[in-house]
Amino acid sequence: MFGLRNYLRREHKLAKIICVGGGKGGTGKSSVAVNMSVLLVEKGFRVLLVDADVESPVDHLLLGITRKKVGEVRSFLPRIDPEKCIRCGACTNACPEHALIGLRGQVPTLLRELCEGCKLCYYVCPVKAIRDDHRVIGEIYEGSDGLIHLIQGEVLPGVKQHVNVTVATIRYGEGLFEKYDYVIIDTAPGTGANIWFPLIKSDLAIAVTEPTPLGANDLHRYLELVKKAQKRFIVVLNKANIPGGRKELVKKVVKRYEGDDIIEIPYDKEFLESYIKSKLIASLSLNSGVTKALRELIRKALTMLES
Amino acid sequence: MKKNREIVVASGKGGTGKTTISSFLITFLWRKGLPVVGVDADVEAPDLVITLGDHREVSRETIIDSKVAVIDYNSCSNCRECYKACQFNAIEWVNKPIVIQELCEGCGVCSYVCPEKAIKMKLVETGDLIVYETKYAPIVTGELRIGRKHSGKLVDILKEKARKINNEGLIIIDAAAGTGCPVISSIVGADYLIIVVEPTPQSMKTAGKIADIGNFFNTAMGVIVNKYDLNPSFVKYVKKWADERKIEFLGQVPYDENVVRAYVNAKSLFEYAPNSPATKSLEEILNVWFEKLSEEGA
């Protein structure tokens, strides 16, 4: 179903899309995504960074970008007209989340927190007594530091539909993809639908992990997802040399999924500091192990995308 | 009176130490001799048992609680009604409607609006519910089928299972990263929410959202700054933040290599390094917290 897109991309030089994930939280996905963007810009490419971790978007902080709200993500929310409602119970019976409750003979009550916005009630109402009361579930931001352009989605607190906001953010970004050489999508931790959607839109997946049993366990689930999406991938082992680390566990997982050599980023106080102080790796010394590893990652990614 | 007490550990941002602190809390309560059950609510990346040392799977059941739309193309008239009605972008149009199963919420709108009755809702596996035995407590966990959407539902089912196993003790819930559906499901009904933060603005930003969710459900909350010594001057900012939001400041824990060493050696942190800096400060924090909680509960 995405064959057409791939064809167009080859023929018309559409942007190449790289998505950064890995399963476990806190392994350095955002750091890697942001620094890959910086290094690609350094090479003279036009780069769009899409922060699709809508539950905790931080890329603007890492880049020091002041973002601007450019859109809202809305969802359906029913409003029942008590004048029109014939109290038949059709909507309360249909609601899959039991967000509409009420006895027969009563106008149903809406429990907003339970509503997923599927709109089934609107369709089943025989007298069209339900209309759309639109609610905002997320926001889309844009910003730029002059070199990297950033698009970012953010779900509002207490809203359950984070997947909808992820999808809307990427759909918004897609409208701009043609202006860029490379699009980097920074994704959330986990291996659910909000990771799947960016993944199927991508040409290459970067899986960032750490040398621990937890990192290996989550990488295993992430690569299963990558396999299902039939994407190529590069595994980045961050904090590769932490004391007591278990590199071999990660290597075993990578081997199982027939991956290439792993890119190892050494544990580096300076790199960590750059994250804590929200500074870019570009400010690190050119010969640090971290910079070398990131450059190697870019070289490898570009080679894979060109072939 | 509610018999169980439920304590949730959440952070918003990933990798702050939720699982480490949940795991330590379980070993702490075990030492107090209290009946405790752990719930690993990170069903997209379940790791809690790994941090508790030796564990054994005692039961595994498949949860079939998700529905997805299936289109019968022989009856489909290409009218686009389903495509227009789906609120979850789960139907793509490529000459015909195609269901992206991973995005399908299972609500059945498409099936309802289809004039040809060409769409049926099919029950599919949500994931597995697994109970592990560890030295300290039974752990209820789930594994969501890769790429699926219904992690919140699975979390509800895990919590139900934990309440059945232990109907008058403490339930410790290790929430997933993020602030979305599965995390909300973890927090609903909890008696106390421990927010774990790192000393970075990135972490505080999402911790704020977790606190908003806690507020929304009127949950009592406390905050722990993990790896505080990576940026010690930041702690006063967290204290102020907690103060303004009426969140208890529970304490700070230093970065400690023993945390990683412990789970690499398949031991709980307490057992592996009882005198390490992280163990000591966690022990101190939890002692104070636990005393307060007991007083209030009495």
Image: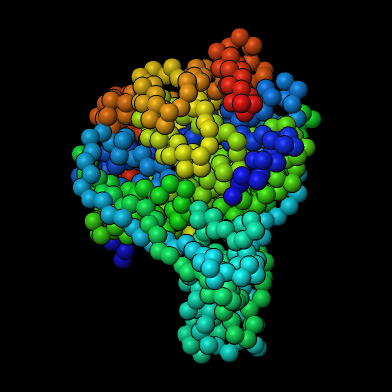
Q: Quadrant of residue A204?
A: top right
Way the structure is coloured: rainbow
* Residue visible at 47% across and 20% down in the picture: A261
Q: Nearer the viewer, residue B242 or A110?
A: A110
Residue located farthest toward the front when viewing the structure as drawn: B74
The picture places residue A94, in percent across and down from the top left corner, at 50, 76
Figure quadrant of the C terminus of chain A: top right
Q: Is residue A155 above or below residue A277?
A: below
Q: Nearer the viewer, residue B80 or A117?
A: B80
Decide if residue B197 is in sight here: no
The picture places residue A11, in percent across and down from the top left corner, at 72, 36
Q: Is residue A134 above or below residue A92?
A: above
Q: Quadrant of residue B202?
A: top right
Decide if residue A219 is in sight here: yes
* Residue visible at 22% across and 35% down in the picture: B54
* Residue visible at 52% across and 31% down in the picture: A233
Q: Is residue B92 above or below residue B55?
A: below
The picture places residue A53, in percent across and down from the top left corner, at 58, 42
* Residue visible at 28% across and 32% down in the picture: B268
For this view, does B293 lie left or right of residue A92?
left
The picture places residue A214, in percent across and down from the top left corner, at 38, 33
Q: Is residue B56 above or below residue B186?
A: above
- How many dots with numbers? 0
Residue located farthest toward the top when viewing the structure as drawn: A287
Q: Quadrant of residue A300?
A: top right
Q: Nearer the viewer, residue A73 or B15?
A: A73
